[in-house]
Amino acid sequence: MSPPSSTETTTAPLGRLDHHRASSIGSSDSSQYLLSDIQNSKQAPSNIFGISKTHPFANYWTCQGGLPEVLGVLPNKDQADILIAKYFEAVDPVYPMIDKQQFHADYDSFWALPPAEKPEADAALIGLHFVVYAMGTQFIEMSSDKERQQIAEFYASAAHQALRISSYLTRTSLTAVQAMVLICYFLMNDNKASDAWAFGGVLMRQAYAIGLNRDPEGSMPQASARDKQQRRKVWQAVYFQDTFLTVLLKLPPTATFSDNLVEGLLDDPEDTPPCTIGGVVCTYPQSSNPMSICNIAPTTSSTPGPSGALRMDVAFIRSMWLLATIVQPSICTPRALNNPLTTSPRDKANLISSFRNYYTSLPSSFTLSHHTKFAVFAADNPRVARQNLFLRSNYWHAFMLVLADENANAGVRCDVHGAVEAGRVAIGAFFDIWHNFRADAGIWWVFQHRAFEEAVSPCLTPHPSNHVTNSRCSFSLLPYSQHFPRHVALHPPHRHTELHQSLIPSSLTLRKIVGRFLKSWNMWEMALRRCRRLGQRCCARHSKRLHGEVAVC
């Protein structure tokens, strides 16, 4: 049989994938979409988790163009200022790994260079600028979504080309790693999760190569406290991205070797010096340059000042770092091997306790979830409100997975009521971001896919009999499937909370699904109440038969 031509797309049905996996000599428990598990002579390449069929970075570049060719497509200064301001408004609050003061100083210094000297700039820094432009473009309101996507993808291609010119595969830096982290998030938001997964592997190797996983107190004892703090922030960004992407994709985590621990993160490095460029002290948020981005887009009165924002950012980084250290070994690792999360009821109780203890230790600004109060909070402090939303979404999604875990052989039961309630609280974070930051809600791929999994989790069942079981009674959730979109399949996956890969939709389909859920907010309360009432009736009937008395669930 001749191979398909380059213009021909061949996609094997899911049944064929499973058939080849059954006869493969590879691991039978790994992802069904990994091509290493498929006999190459019988299976055409297929997408892993995305819908893209081309290289994620379009090639606009010539062999001899070099950095001047990349600089030739820079936006004008006014447009760049708008995109930088949008990035620090929408992206930096939830991934605060860039030293804002240093970035603004480098940015102003670059734009102040005469045209003849700009090609001498650091190519990795230019790559960072371009990916910031790309992410800023994703959050800019435009008349056409297609136009916005094309412009953002063009800037992302320029960022990648700048990194190529810097030889980022053979020589890297903290700036290059920061650019690569943002490129991964850009690819996710651009519905290229499989490309982000692959690119993240290169990112992880380069982060290891420059020692970001090592405690800077031991690996860089002569560095300033500011530099050590910055390395910890960037490592946290790499570690966090790897952990929570693997939660969604159910693939093995790779940020697993580190002695750079959260305990080393400082609230305020004692020897933090003012930022300097060429011996000139750069103050924040004001700059001596009247065209500086700091002066064009100053901090609003409702946002904390530099010191207050820094303290909250450090608290947010610490909180997310701690959450990742709990989630990675307890959820990512066992799910990557298709194993239950816990091995005994006591083990599950201890894991639940660790999650609850973590949540009670969080600052109140990160746990506020009352819809009306949060709307006021978001209007007064949008930066911390965005941090609140991402922390709540990640925490309650992970907690839902823990509560829904079951291990029949070890006597571990699925806590149906707890899992549904945790899913309801988790999806509440999506409704809050939708109501208060609607443009953000339409862009963040990770937020959308967590919401999708939380939304359909009540109609996924742990047993082929389509019944869910708690410690006291057994009942079916299928009667409530009428409240969900008709095209959501109810085929039981391997475990109660593990979404079958075929259920992961494209961003367009996902937005339609989420739109339907937005019209059905009361569905969650209604489904939960019905589950409880039905569970009580089942327990009562069962108790009457055995003991002649009514038990209360």
Image (cartoon, rainbow, N blue to C red):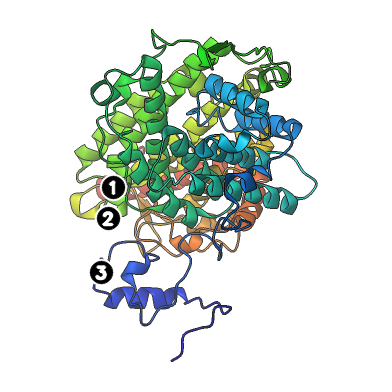
Q: Are marks 1 and 2 in contact (CB under 8 Å)?
A: yes
Q: In this picture, is 476 found above or below 28?
A: above
Please tell me in which quadrant of the rendered image residue 463 appears: bottom left
Quadrant of the image containing the N terminus: bottom left
Regarding residue 401, the answer to whether it shows in the image is no
- The crowding category of the residue bearing disc 3, from other C-alpha atoms within 10 Å (few below 14, some 14 to 19, many at least 20), is few
Q: Identify whether 452 is placed above or below 119.
A: below
- Which of the 4 image quarters holds residue 272? top left
Percent position (x, y) of residue 144?
A: 77, 50
Residue of label 3? 26
Separation of marks 1 and 3 at Cα, in angstroms: 19 Å
Q: Choose between 43 and 535: the one closer to the eye.
A: 43
Name which residue type carries label 3.
Gly
Q: CA distance from mark 3 to mark 2?
A: 13 Å
- Label 2: element kind: loop
* Mark toward the viewer: 3 or 2: 3
Marker disc for residue 333? 1
Residue occupying the point 64% across, 48% down: 69
* Tag 2: amino acid: Leu
Q: Is residue 552 visible?
A: yes
Give the residue displayed 47% in from the left and 76% down from the top.
13
Location of the C terminus (image quadrant): top left
Where in the figure is residue 413, as x and y percent of width and height? 29, 47
> Which residue is label 2 attached to?
337
Label 1 is placed on what type of residue? Thr
Specify which label sits upstream in the sequence, 3 or 2. 3
443 displayed left or right of 528: right
